[in-house]
Image (tube, rainbow, N blue to C red):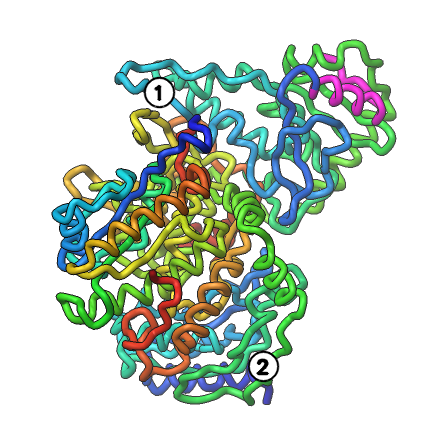
């Protein structure tokens, strides 16, 4: 088991194709540094992110989950992120109610032009998850 | 004339005049104390209908089963009516095929006590009906014990809350009684039954149990009418209303929606407002 | 094997000793009634409820049995053998359920090694019923409140003392040092039996059912009966004799287990073919299968009705269905 000092969290990031994924791309092109903790899954829209995806990432052993899409009003599909926002609000409340630590799952809006913001976000999320330690609660253990 | 007699009389009339092909209501309780649902298709069968509320089920669930049989009358308490409203909003039922016999509800009695859901009932009277049998009943004072327990639970630390819910959900035997009795759980293939690919594990482990119950509660967000049928159906006594109350509260507070109370207001999670609160998003 | 007599104190000592030596399971109080739990001291036992919420079948046929494990290289690893266990406080109906499972799963030419191995490692100490619930009907399906079928040792509570009737050598060993029961003890037990039996009124004519059911396969009665049923799995999962399973492989982070888990004929997935075709898509056909299986198929296959009259399906049914009423309606069907 990794001790707290050397704990390198694994974070699954669901990034929308039109904004956040492009933002991550821009961070790369701009040669910005951020921790190598995230595993990116590109989705067409934040509205495509079923809460089940987030839970399944935690079940499979991810230490944190980041969900990011276009800023409200900027959705490529006009309203995808608005609908997603309601869904995420209920999920976020329920997860905290169940005792999943705040910070284990992060929601954010990052546009295609915000490479710097993306790098900063990943750094912050990684720090937060590092502080929380490995995900033990929803991680699935076989019988 | 008492409510039961009035109900039977109306049921008989509806069946005699062939206005409906069936009346769905409650029969007398069986040895387990629960009233099986009564499907009366003749005036004689309607004789066993009773207004007593030992029926643990949400009758809207059965409307889905008989929706291709023609016009059906259904006895509807507050929660039955709210579920019917949600099903109408989601185009699962046709209003013209329903004759709703509204009835005020005094709560389901379970093991000598008012059922948990009924103890904090906010809508004992039907929100939608064609005729009301008897008088509306006043909403009960919410049971302070339940409200206090909820408050205490939310004040626990995340770890303590997780421990409590883990102990509770580890007992889940995944019989899916909670899903089957829910009128608003009607997907042709539930995500737990998807097998190509398999979405949720089938072995006994806490993680899968938790995910099942979290996703179930999420799927019910803005649609759950807090009737408590799932809570009463659970054979191992898991406190499912704890989840349902929390989700319904979130939806009420954040989006101002109360499931099934207004036929013209779309279910909360199918719509949005551009200025919905988003304090949790970075 | 001679019936013996055991005092409450001696029984406590016996349980305390067993808890030290092996895994000892007994009914303990919980929020919904009593449930099975591993105990470490005799005073944790609670026999006040007529029966536990869940049956005892899990001791020989667990909800999730690991058949194989694979290491990250993909090599199979044999799972650990079942533990030596003693189950105390099992009621005669549940013991009959286990007797059925063992009979069903250890037939000539098709023996299930897992159930067999678990039963061999298990000692069942039953406690006869001194009272009944309105949902009890063991007498109607060939059981008895003092039945010993499936048990290793049966105890009958006579107040300060208990009558201990060994059924197998395993049971005999536990009480071999105790004094033999006298005439008054046997009379007291017989009287209790008579009293409790008188409380159970509803009976089912299972012999007639077996003759009737094959002719009722196409009957319209199932549609009418199944209308109330919501097709959940509560009745089958809580049934002491329901014995269907599914085998599932699950892999996570490189490790794999092959498990068999309880399955229920009430689920649509249960009968779905690999092609996607489902011969039992209609809820009524699933309802029919359950009744047919209990009173006809298993009689043909294992020579025993697979209903022990514990009443759990009646108690647990969210729709308030009573299997005794179902049987009555089936018997009256044309």
- State which quadrant residue B154 falls in: bottom right
Q: Nearer the viewer, residue B188 or C90?
A: B188
- Tag 2 secondary structure: loop
- Quarter of the image containing the C terminus of chain C? bottom left
Which stretch appears magenta? C1-19
Q: Is residue B113 left or right of residue B4?
A: right
Tell me residue C247's x, y (percent).
32, 30
Residues packed near mark 2 inside 10 Å, few (<14), some (14 to 19) or many (20 plus) = some
* Subunit bearing disc 1: C
Q: Nearer the viewer, residue B197 or C322?
A: B197
Quick check: do tags 2 and 1 share a chain? no
Tell me residue C268's x, y (percent).
29, 47
Residues packed near mark 1 inside 10 Å, few (<14), some (14 to 19) or many (20 plus) = many
- Tag 1 secondary structure: strand
Residue at the (39%, 88%) spot, across then down: B130
Residue at the (50%, 70%) spot, across then down: B26
**Residue at mark 2:** B139
| Residue A49: mark in rendering | none
- Quarter of the image containing the N terminus of chain C? top right
Q: Report if residue B2 is visible in the image.
A: yes
Tell me residue B191's x, y (percent).
29, 50
* Subunit bearing disc 2: B
Please say whether residue C8 is one of the residues in the magenta stretch: yes
Q: Report if residue C208 is visible in the image.
A: no
Residue at the (41%, 40%) spot, across then down: A130
Please say whether residue B44 is one of the residues in the magenta stretch: no
Q: Is residue C313 left or right of residue B278?
A: right
**Residue at mark 1:** C69
Question: Spatial distance from mark 2 to mark 1, Cα to Cα?
Answer: 56 Å
Residue at the (46%, 47%) spot, across then down: C234
- State which quadrant residue B281 falls in: bottom left
Dominant SS of magenta comes to helix
């Amino acid at each position: 088991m990794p001790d707290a000092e050397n704990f390198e969290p694994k974070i699954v990031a669901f990034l929308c194709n039109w904004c956040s994924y492009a933002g991550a791309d821009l961070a790369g092109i701009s040669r910005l540094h951020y921790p190598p903790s995230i595993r990116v899954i590109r989705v067409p829209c934040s509205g495509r992110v079923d809460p089940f995806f987030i839970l399944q990432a935690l079940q499979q052993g991810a230490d944190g989950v980041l969900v990011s899409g276009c800023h409200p009003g900027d959705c490529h599909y006009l309203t995808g992120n608005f609908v997603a926002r309601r869904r995420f609000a209920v999920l976020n409340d329920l997860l905290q109610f169940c005792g999943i630590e705040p910070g284990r799952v992060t929601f954010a809006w990052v546009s295609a032009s915000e490479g710097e913001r993306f790098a900063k976000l990943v750094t912050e999320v990684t720090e937060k998850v590092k502080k929380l330690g490995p995900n033990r609660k929803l991680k699935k253990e076989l019988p | 004339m008492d409510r039961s007699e009035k109900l039977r009389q109306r049921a008989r009339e509806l069946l005699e005049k062939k206005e409906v092909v069936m009346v769905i209501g409650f029969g007398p309780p069986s040895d387990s104390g629960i009233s099986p649902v009564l499907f009366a298709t003749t005036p004689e069968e309607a004789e066993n209908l009773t207004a007593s509320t030992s029926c643990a089920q949400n009758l809207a669930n059965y409307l889905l089963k008989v929706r291709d049989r023609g016009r059906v009358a259904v006895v509807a308490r507050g929660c039955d009516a709210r579920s019917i409203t949600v099903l109408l909003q989601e185009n699962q039922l046709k209003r013209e095929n329903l004759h709703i016999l509204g009835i005020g509800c005094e709560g389901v009695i379970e093991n000598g006590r008012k059922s948990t859901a009924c103890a904090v009932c906010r809508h004992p009277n039907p929100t939608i009906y064609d005729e009301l049998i008897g008088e509306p009943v006043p909403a009960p004072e919410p049971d302070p014990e339940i409200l206090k327990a909820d408050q205490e639970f939310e004040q626990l630390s995340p770890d303590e809350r997780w421990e409590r819910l883990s102990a509770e959900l580890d007992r889940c035997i995944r019989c899916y009684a909670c899903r089957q009795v829910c009128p608003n759980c009607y997907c042709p293939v539930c995500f737990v039954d998807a097998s190509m690919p398999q979405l949720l594990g089938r072995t006994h482990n806490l993680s899968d149990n938790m995910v099942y119950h979290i996703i179930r509660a999420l799927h019910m967000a803005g649609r759950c009418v807090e009737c408590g049928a799932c809570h009463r159906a659970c054979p191992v006594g898991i406190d499912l209303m704890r989840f349902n109350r929390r989700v319904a509260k979130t939806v009420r507070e954040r989006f101002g929606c109360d499931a099934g109370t207004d036929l013209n207001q779309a279910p909360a999670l199918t719509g949005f407002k551009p200025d919905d609160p988003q304090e949790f998003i970075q | 094997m001679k019936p013996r007599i055991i005092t409450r104190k001696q029984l406590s000592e016996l349980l305390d000793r067993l808890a030290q030596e092996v895994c000892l399971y007994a009914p303990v109080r919980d929020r919904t009634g009593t449930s099975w739990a591993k105990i470490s001291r005799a005073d944790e036992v609670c026999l006040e409820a007529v029966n536990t919420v869940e049956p005892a079948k899990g001791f020989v046929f667990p909800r999730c049995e690991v058949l194989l494990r694979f290491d990250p290289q993909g090599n199979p690893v044999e799972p650990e053998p079942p533990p030596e266990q003693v189950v105390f406080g099992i009621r005669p109906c549940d013991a009959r359920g286990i007797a059925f499972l063992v009979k069903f799963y250890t037939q000539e030419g098709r023996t299930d090694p897992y159930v067999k191995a678990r039963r061999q490692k298990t000692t069942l100490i039953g406690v006869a019923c001194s009272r009944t619930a309105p949902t009890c009907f063991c007498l109607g399906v060939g059981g008895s409140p003092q039945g010993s079928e499936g048990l290793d040792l049966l105890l009958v509570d006579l107040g300060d003392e208990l009558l201990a009737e060994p059924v197998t050598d395993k049971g005999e060993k536990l009480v071999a040092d105790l004094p033999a029961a006298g005439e008054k003890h046997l009379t007291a037990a017989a009287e209790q039996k008579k009293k409790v039996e008188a409380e159970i009124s509803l009976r089912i004519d299972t012999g007639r059912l077996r003759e009737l059911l094959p002719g009722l396969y196409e009957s319209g009665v199932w549609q009418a009966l199944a209308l109330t049923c919501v097709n959940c799995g509560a009745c089958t999962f809580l049934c002491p004799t329901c014995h269907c399973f599914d085998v599932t492989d699950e892999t996570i982070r490189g490790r794999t287990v092959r498990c068999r888990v309880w399955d229920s004929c009430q689920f649509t997935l249960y009968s779905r073919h690999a092609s996607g075709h489902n011969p039992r898509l209609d809820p009524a056909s699933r309802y029919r299968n359950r009744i047919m299986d209990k009173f006809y198929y298993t009689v043909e296959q294992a020579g025993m009705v697979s209903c022990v009259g514990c009443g759990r399906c009646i108690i647990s049914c969210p729709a308030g269905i009573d299997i005794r009423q179902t049987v009555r309606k089936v018997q009256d069907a044309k």
